Every structure is written in structure tokens, then in C-alpha cells.
Image (spheres, rainbow, N blue to C red):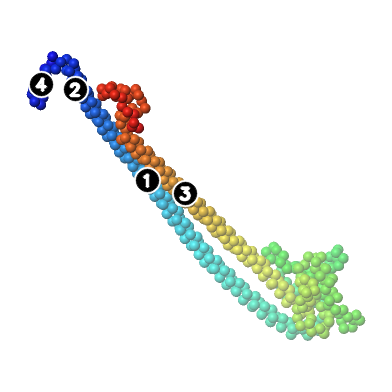
């Protein structure tokens, strides 16, 4: 027999061995269940705390990654903005330099053209003075017309022209060639050939034909009868001008009026009276010399024009290169914008991935919080039997909870 004392009333009573074993078994089962419950509760609390700590750490890591990406994005954006500002400054500076260069060249061109205009005006004034002098000389020789015609009676026209040249022009044209044309190898010849050079270059050449006819001549010729042959002789002897010195058609007002230009019939051909022999040579010499000067001035002007054209080409090349660099800078800018857009899209994908990860963590947390012993042992008879044995439960639990 066993004596037991009631903890509440203090009464002592006796129990047999079987009752004592039963009471002891009840006490042990209650203590085991209490201890098991306490340990399960502690495990659940520890699991919940650990999950919260992991979620907090994941959130902090995710925030740190997002902050780092935002900082990288801001740094890249700042660098691109700085590069864009630098390119815009270069473009503005290049445009300013281009405008300054254009203004300088325009001013230089205006100055050069003004200078050339002044030079041309001076040349024009000089030519007008020479023309006026020639007109005075022509008027003077018109006054000598009658006297010279009288003088022709005692000498031939060729002798008269040769004498006039040697007396009046030879002193001022010492290197000039004025001789009879004795070369008839081409089948015909003229009367006189005149040539002169300037600085080693022939600048004027004239084929002369002299025609004199007395009033007693039976057959009267006209000046046009000799023009064709004179033009052929000029070409054969490589002369630039052809001049018919004629006393034919003495009553013609056309030929008596002065120098007659026949270029409408034959190129560079003139018909004159003897009194205009010296003035015509002087006129052609001065005009040909001026032609050389004009050719030189023209070559200089063409050279300057070429220089201006070269500058314009260089300016056009600069514009092309500047435009190409500007296009490249614009393309770089567009490429940078595309890279920024790609970075934004990449960040958006990371954001979506993080949001998806957060949703998965939330679902996992919900499942962890819903975890119980019954859910763990559902569908697992072995584990269920072990827990039932620990509880001392002789009656199997109902598998009604999922």
C-alpha cells in the first residue's frame, strides 16, 4: 500500500500499487505534454524571429543594392550631361570662329576689290588720255593731207612709208623690224613686214601692202580688190595685223576720213591713207603693249581669284568637317541617351525582380506562420505515430487538417 497526502486539504490516504502506478503515469504524461508544448512554442518563436531577421537583412541588402544602382545611374547621367555641355560649348565656339573667319575674309575681299577698282580706274583714265592724244594727232595729220599728197608725186608710196618709219619711229622703236617682204616661197608676198618685241616677247606684227595709182592709169582698181591677197599674205607670214596703205579711190569720203576698220571682212585688217601710216603703227604698238599689261594683270587677278576660290574651298572643307564632327557628337549624344534608356530599363527589370522576390518571401512567410505539428505530420504516418507516442495518446488523431 502507498500513502499519499493531498496538497490542497492535507488529508492522508492510502492507495494500492495499481492505483499508484496509474496516478504516477498521469503525472508523467501531463509534465511531458507541458514540456513538449513549451519546447514547440520556443521553436516556433525562434523560427519566427529568425525569419524576421532574414527578411530584415534581405530588405536592407535590397535597399543597399537599389541605392548603389541609383548612385551609379546618377553618376553616369552627370557624366553624360557634362559631356553634352562640353560638346555644345565646342559647337558654339566653332560657329563663332567660323563667323569671325567669314567676316575677315569678306572684309579682305572687299578691300582687294576696291583696290582693283582704283587700279582699273587709273588705267582707264590713262587710256582715255592716250586716245585724246591720238585724236589730236589724227587731226594734225588731216591738216597735212593735201601737202603729203603733193609730196607723193615725186616719189613712190613704198619709199615714202619707209622714209617716214626710219625718220619718226626708228628712234623710239630701236629694236623693231621693218623690212621689205622678199620671201615669195609661199607663192606670194606683201610689201613690208613690221615686228617688235617687249622683254623678249613679240607683242605686235603687221603685214603692209602699198597701193598707188596715178590719174592717168587706164584701169582703175578699188581697195577691196587687194584685201583677200593681203589677208592670205598675213596668214602665211604669221602676222597679227594686215594694213593696206592706199591712194586708190581718192574721192572716197570713207577712206579719206581716217583709219577704216575692215575686220568685218577680214580679221584685224585696216585700210589707211599714207598720212595715217605712222599714227596707226603707234596706235597698234601702244595697244599691243597694253594688251601684255592687261594679260599680266589678268593673270594676277586670276591668281588672286584662284586664291579666293582656294579659300572658299577650304572654308567649304571646314564646314563639311565641322558638320561631320557635329553629326558625330549628335550621334554620340543619341547613343548616350539610348544607353541611359537601357540602364533605366535594366533598373526597372531589377525592380520587378525584387518585387517578385518580396512576394515570394511573403508567401514563404505566410506558409511558415501557418506551419503546425499536424500540418507537418499530415500524410506521414510514421512521424504522426512518433508524436502520438510522445504525447502518450493511445487514440490515433484524426487526419482532418490539411
Residue drawn at 38 percent across, 48 percent down: 74
Find disc 1 in the rendering and name its residue. Answer: 70
Q: Secondary structure at mark 1?
A: helix
Give the label, 2 or 4, closer to the camera.
Answer: 4
Up the image or down, 205 lies above or below 346; here it is: below
Q: Nearer the viewer, residue 111 or 216?
A: 111
**Of label 2 and label 3, which has the lower sequence position?**
2
Check whether the beta carbons of the residues at disc 2 and disc 4 lie within 8 A of each other.
Answer: no
Residue 107 visible? The answer is: yes
Q: Secondary structure at mark 4?
A: strand
Cα–Cα span, label 2 and label 4: 15 Å
**Of label 1 and label 3, which has the lower sequence position?**
1
Determine which of the numbered discs, if any, sits on residue 27 in the image: 2
Cα–Cα span, label 1 and label 3: 17 Å
How would you rate the neighbour count of disc 3 (Cα within 10 Å): few for under 14, some for 14-19, many for 20 or more? Answer: few
How would you rate the neighbour count of disc 4 (Cα within 10 Å): few for under 14, some for 14-19, many for 20 or more? Answer: few
Indicate left or right for 13 with 82 as reference.
left
Q: Nearer the viewer, residue 202 or 375?
A: 375
| Image quadrant where one finds the N terminus | top left
Amino acid at each position: 500500500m502507498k500513502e499519499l497526502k493531498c496538497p490542497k486539504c492535507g488529508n492522508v490516504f492510502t492507495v494500492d500499487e495499481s492505483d499508484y502506478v496509474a496516478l504516477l503515469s498521469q503525472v508523467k504524461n501531463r509534465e511531458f505534454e507541458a514540456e513538449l508544448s513549451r519546447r514547440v512554442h520556443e521553436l516556433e518563436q525562434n523560427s519566427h524571429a529568425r525569419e524576421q531577421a532574414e527578411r530584415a537583412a534581405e530588405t536592407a541588402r535590397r535597399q543597399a543594392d537599389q541605392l548603389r544602382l541609383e548612385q551609379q545611374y546618377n553618376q553616369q547621367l552627370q557624366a553624360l550631361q557634362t559631356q553634352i555641355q562640353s560638346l555644345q560649348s565646342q559647337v558654339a565656339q566653332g560657329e563663332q570662329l567660323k563667323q569671325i573667319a567669314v567676316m575677315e575674309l569678306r572684309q579682305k575681299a572687299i578691300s582687294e576689290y576696291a583696290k582693283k577698282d582704283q587700279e582699273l580706274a587709273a588705267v582707264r583714265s590713262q587710256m582715255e588720255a592716250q586716245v585724246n592724244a591720238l585724236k589730236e594727232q589724227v587731226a594734225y595729220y588731216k591738216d597735212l593731207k593735201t601737202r603729203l599728197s603733193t609730196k607723193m608725186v615725186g616719189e613712190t608710196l613704198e619709199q615714202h612709208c619707209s622714209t617716214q618709219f626710219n625718220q619718226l619711229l626708228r628712234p623710239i622703236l630701236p629694236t623693231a623690224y621693218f623690212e621689205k617682204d622678199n620671201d615669195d616661197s609661199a607663192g606670194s608676198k606683201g610689201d613690208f613686214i613690221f615686228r617688235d618685241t617687249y622683254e623678249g616677247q613679240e607683242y605686235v606684227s603687221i603685214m603692209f601692202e602699198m597701193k598707188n595709182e596715178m590719174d592717168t592709169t587706164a584701169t582703175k582698181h578699188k581697195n577691196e580688190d587687194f584685201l583677200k591677197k593681203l589677208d592670205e599674205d598675213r596668214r602665211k607670214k604669221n602676222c597679227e595685223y594686215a594694213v593696206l596703205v592706199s591712194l586708190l579711190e581718192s574721192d572716197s569720203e570713207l577712206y579719206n576720213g581716217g583709219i577704216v576698220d575692215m575686220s568685218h571682212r577680214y580679221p584685224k585688217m585696216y585700210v589707211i591713207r599714207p598720212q595715217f601710216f605712222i599714227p596707226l603703227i603707234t596706235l597698234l604698238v601702244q595697244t599691243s603693249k597694253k594688251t601684255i599689261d592687261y594679260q599680266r594683270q589678268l593673270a594676277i587677278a586670276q591668281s588672286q581669284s584662284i586664291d579666293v576660290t582656294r579659300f572658299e574651298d577650304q572654308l567649304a572643307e571646314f564646314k563639311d568637317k565641322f558638320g561631320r564632327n557635329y553629326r558625330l557628337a549628335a550621334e554620340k549624344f543619341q547613343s548616350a541617351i539610348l544607353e541611359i534608356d537601357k540602364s533605366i530599363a535594366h533598373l526597372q527589370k531589377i525592380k520587378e525582380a525584387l518585387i517578385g522576390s518580396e512576394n515570394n518571401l511573403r508567401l514563404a512567410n505566410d506558409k511558415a506562420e501557418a506551419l503546425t505539428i499536424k500540418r507537418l505530420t499530415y500524410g506521414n504516418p510514421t512521424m504522426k505515430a512518433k508524436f502520438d507516442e510522445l504525447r502518450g495518446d493511445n487514440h490515433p488523431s484524426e487526419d482532418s487538417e490539411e
